Image (tube, rainbow, N blue to C red):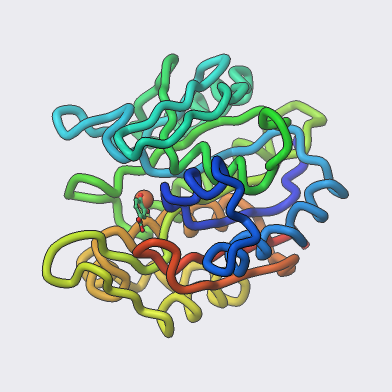
Amino acid sequence: MARILGGLTTSHVPAIGGAIAKGLQQQPYWKPFFDGFLPVRAWLDEVKPDVAMVFYNDHGLNFFLDKMPTFAVGAAPEYRNADEGWGLPTLPPFQGAPELSWHLINHLVAREFDITTCQEMLVDHAFALPLKLFWPEGPCPVRTVPVCINTVQFPLPSARRCVALGKAVGEALASWDSDQKVVVIGTGGLSHQLDGERAGFINKPFDLKFMQSLIEEPEWATRFSIPELVEKTGTQGVELLMWLAARAAVPGPVRRVHSNYHIPISNTAAGMMALAAA
Ligand code: DHB
Ligand code: FE
C-alpha cells in the first residue's frame, strides 16, 4: 500500500515563471511570495515523496474550447511543458508514473467517473510552475500524475463533485500496491479575476476562511454552487476546486506544516499550504 504523506496547494500565476527565469526571488515584490516555500521545501527534504498526484487546470494548451473534458487523467511516461502564450521559458519534461496512472484510471472508471484518459499530454504553467516552486533544484525529482479539472469552459463540475473525485483518488492511492510515498498537489486560485467588469477582484476574508476550512472542515466549500464561488472568488478564483480535490484525496485529519497568503502576485491573491497527513 502506497503511503500518502499529505497535500500541497499553491496558486500558479504565469509571472512566477518569469521571476524564476530572471532570478527575482529576493526582490521586494517577490520575496514575500517565494519565502513562503522555504519551510515546505525543508519538509519535503525530510519526508522525500516519490510521486506527486497533481490536480490542476489546463488553460487552453492541451485542451481547447472545441474539446473540453470535465476530468482528465494523464497516463504518459513523460509530460512536456509548453508555453500557451505567456512568453515563458519552458521547463524540462516531467516524468510520469504510468503504472499509477492506470491504477487510478481503472479505479475512477469503476467508481463511475467518466474521465478522459490522456496517453499524451502537454502541461502548462498550472502544472509546471508549482512543481518548480516545491522542487526548485534541477529537473523535477518526483514522478507525476496529472489530474486536470475543467475550470475554463462552463459548465464546471461542482465543488461537491470535485471533493468526490478527490476522495476516489485517495482510495486509489490507498489501494495502490506499492511502497512509494505520494504527495497530492492542488494548483490554482485563490481569489482572482483576470477580465470583465470585476477584473482585479480579490476577496481576502473568503480566501482565509477557505484555507482554514481545509484543516478544520474540508468540505465547507461544497455548500457553494459554482456561480456562488465565482461571485465570491472571481471567474478564475474558482480554480480553488483543485485545492478542494487535493485535500479530499488526503484521508483523515491533517496538520499544517506551513501556509502563506500574499496579495497580489500579478492579479492573484497567492495562497500556499502544506498539510501533512496526521
Ligand atoms: C494569472 C493567474 C492565473 O491563475 C492564471 O492561470 C493566469 C494568470 C494572473 O494573475 O496573472
Ligand atoms: Fe490559472
Q: Give the image location of residue 167, x and y in percent.
A: 53, 50
Q: Is residue 115 left or right of residue 74?
A: left
- Pick whichever, 188 or 114, lies toward us: 188
Give the quarter of the image for residue 39: bottom right
Q: Which residue occupies 19% across, 28% down?
A: 67
Q: Give the image location of residue 195, x and y in percent.
A: 18, 60
Residue 40, above or below 116: below
- Examine the rendering and report whether any part of residue 155 can be seen: yes
Q: Which residue occupies 52% across, 67% down?
A: 29
Residue 141, above or below 233: above
Q: Is residue 16 left or right of residue 227?
A: right
Give the quarter of the image for residue 194: bottom left
Q: Which residue occupies 47% across, 32% down?
A: 89
- Examine the rendering and report whether any part of residue 225 can be seen: no
Farthest-out residue, right: 46
- Pick whichever, 275 or 165, lies toward us: 275
Q: Give the image location of residue 6, x and y in percent.
A: 70, 53
Number of numbered discs present?
0
Q: Is residue 166 left or right of residue 14?
A: right
User: Which quadrant of the figure contains the N terminus?
Assistant: top right
Residue 205, above or below 231: below
User: Which quadrant of the figure contains the C terminus?
Assistant: bottom right
